[in-house]
Image (tube, grey):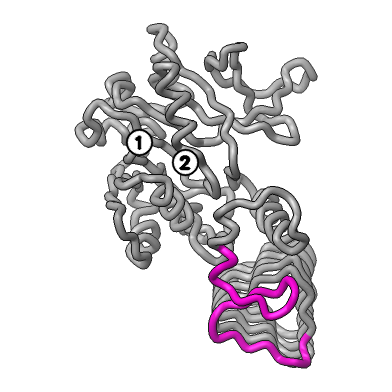
Amino acid sequence: MITKAVILAGGITSRFTPVLEDKHIATLPVFNVPLIAHNVNCLKSKGIREILIAVSKDSSEYIKDVIDNCCYNDVRVEYFEDSEPRGSAGILKDMENYFADENFILMNSNIFIGELNIGDFFAFHNGNKALITVGIKKKKNYQSEGIKIDANGVLHGFYTQHASRERRSFIQHSGLYIFNSAVLKFIDQSGYFDIKEQLIPAIKRVNLPVCTYELGGYCRDFNSFEDYNEFHRENLLSRFFNDGIKFEFEDKIFSKYNEIAEGIWIGENVFVSPESLLIGPLIIGSDSNIECGAKVIGPGLIGNGCKIKEGTMVRESILWDNSVVEKGSRLNFCILGKGVKVNGTNFYKGKILVNNL
């Protein structure tokens, strides 16, 4: 049984610049809740009782603010701050005394683990006596990074994808691992040390087992705005049309909202003018206002404390908390950053909007 997990949340990513400004990807709002808060809750529900979050001086403030504003019973959260970049494996060396000859979950901070069967994952890892088991997922499109795996699921390495068809792979490293704490002795603490580039090759050189396991359930990584939009779109549509596989995390997300009409879910203290037009699927966060004559067309997500003014149109867009769309403005297929105000008569299509416009 695994009861400990590590979340790698150091540094600042450029993948979601500038809408995240200088904040960390772990704070990315997913269905109006920070990504890392979703993951802590998921790990807790799967029996994890101690979570170590590896942070840097750049990410520490934002990560701690999110976690401290959440109430987590029956799980202990601790932070390890890296004073300088040492790679994804480097900071793990500082945690060596924390693990007493046991296994633990390790995950990147850009992953949404909606459903994860840790029991099956660990059973495979333990049954193969692996030092590391790498979680993998099959994707619809071929990936820019390939994974070399033999017929028994043993990992032989990672490589950059070649353009030729025979080298293309539809298998993706998920960013989830199970580690045996014995691997920590292979980490060189004197400099930069990466899991894929240094740690796994060091283990392979002494012929110790590194395995792969195809994850079931729902696990999604966010590497781009396209990933982010697709995630919300597919889950809203799945709920609206009541098709596809149902996951427990969906019930937890939608249980926070009241469905006032077919495919229209709202939070607490939301005002919706009877003279507005809402077409689902839509989630509207708490303390938001939809004024007279406004049209909001889904699939879409409105954050907490948003104001959509008279005569506006918001179509298939995501609005983060406290954003404002002024009278006469139109947004089609946009992401509106936190606290952004779009002034009247502006029209934007397919844009990521930051600051006041």
Residues at marks 2 and 1 touching, judged by CB atoms closer than 8 Å: no
Task: Tell me: residue 84, above or below residue 354.
Answer: above
Q: Read off the residue under disc 1.
A: 2
Q: Residues within 10 Å of mark 1 (few under 14, many from 20)?
A: some
Residue drawn at the location 65% of the way across and 74% of the way down: 265
Q: Amino acid type of disc 1? A: Ile
Question: Which residue appears at 40% of the width and 22% of the height?
Answer: 126
Magenta segment, which residues?
A: 253-276
| Residue bearing mark 2 | 108
Eye-nearest disc, 2 or 1: 1
Q: Is residue 45 visible?
A: yes
In the picture, the disc for residue 296 is: none
Q: Position of residue 197 (x, y in %)?
A: 47, 23
Q: Secondary structure at mark 2?
A: strand
Report the quarter where the C terminus lies: bottom right
The percent coordinates of residue 227 (x first, y second) are 66, 49
**How many neighbours does mark 2 have within 10 angstroms: few (below 14), some (14-19), or many (20 or more)?**
some
Name the residue nearer the viewer: 242 or 181.
242
For label 1, the SS is loop
Say if 208 sits above or below 95 in the image.
above
Kindly identify the residue that appears in the image at 58 percent across and 75 percent down: 285
Comes first in the chain, label 2 or label 1: 1
Is residue 202 within the magenta segment?
no
Image-quadrant location for residue 151? top right
Q: Inspect this view and state whether residue 331 appears.
A: no
Percent across and percent down for residue 25 are 50, 52
Q: Horizontal placement of 301 versus 256: left or right?
A: right
**Residue 22 against residue 115 in the figure, above or below:** below
What residue is at 68 percent from the left and 83 percent from the top? 308
Left or right: 223, with 63 as reference point = right
